[in-house]
Image (cartoon, rainbow, N blue to C red):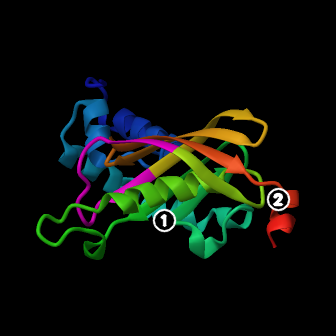
Amino acid sequence: MIRNLSKLERQKRIKEYISKDPFLSDKKLAELFNFSVQTIRLDRLEMGIPEMRKRIVQVAKNTPSTDKVKSLKKEEIIGELIDIELGKNGIAILKTTKDMAFGRTGIIRSHYIFSLADSLAISIIDTEVALTGIARLSYKKPVYAGETLVAKARVARNRGNKYLVSVHVKSDQKEVFTGKLVIFSVNDKVKKEKA
């Protein structure tokens, strides 16, 4: 926590933090700097830095990541791919809506969260055909309609055609889902035999 900073120094540090991680919310910044959310919001507005959701959209518009993906078509990816390094890692976001939620509670149905994680995991595999073989999942807390999910995936291990992919999904900097998925790369020879 950083408390004894002048306003200018605080604003400079806020700008640095946001440039390193555009997904930082005002609430998270307030916790880091030990100031109120309103103070952080005013600082951000004074500096002309948009709110987190707008920053995420800007990052998405400036990153045509779906062009790199080999294993899925653009329309098969759940959410919006923000960044990808094939064979290594990726980031995707999903803005949840009422039609994804249970009507009575407003809680997002789990298959939407899994689909975000699964399509991101498949997307980062550097192959034409990739399939999820095994999934170990943990839902940490409910997600409500209107929340924006940020998923980060990385290849933890690779042996032959098997990839262990670790996926973490957060909403407002709080983890809502984790998964370890074993993704199998299906080689071209198998594809041609089945055709």
Vertical position of residue 127 compared to residue 13: above or below: below
Q: Position of residue 173 (x, y in %)?
A: 34, 43
Which residue is under mark 1?
A: 79
Q: Residue at x 68, y 48 (%)?
A: 184
Instruction: Specify the amino acid type for callout 1.
Output: Gly
Which residue is under mark 2?
A: 190
> Is-magenta flag for residue 143?
yes
Instruction: Specify the amino acid type for callout 2.
Output: Val
Nearest the viewer among 18 and 66 is 66
Q: Quadrant of residue 159?
A: top right
Q: Nearer the viewer, mark 1 or mark 2?
A: 2
For the residues bearing labels 1 and 2, Cβ distance under 8 angstroms: no
Quick one: quadrant of the N terminus? Answer: top left
Q: Quadrant of residue 107?
A: bottom left
Q: Position of residue 90 (x, y in %)?
A: 60, 49
Q: Residues within 10 Å of mark 1 (few under 14, many from 20)?
A: many
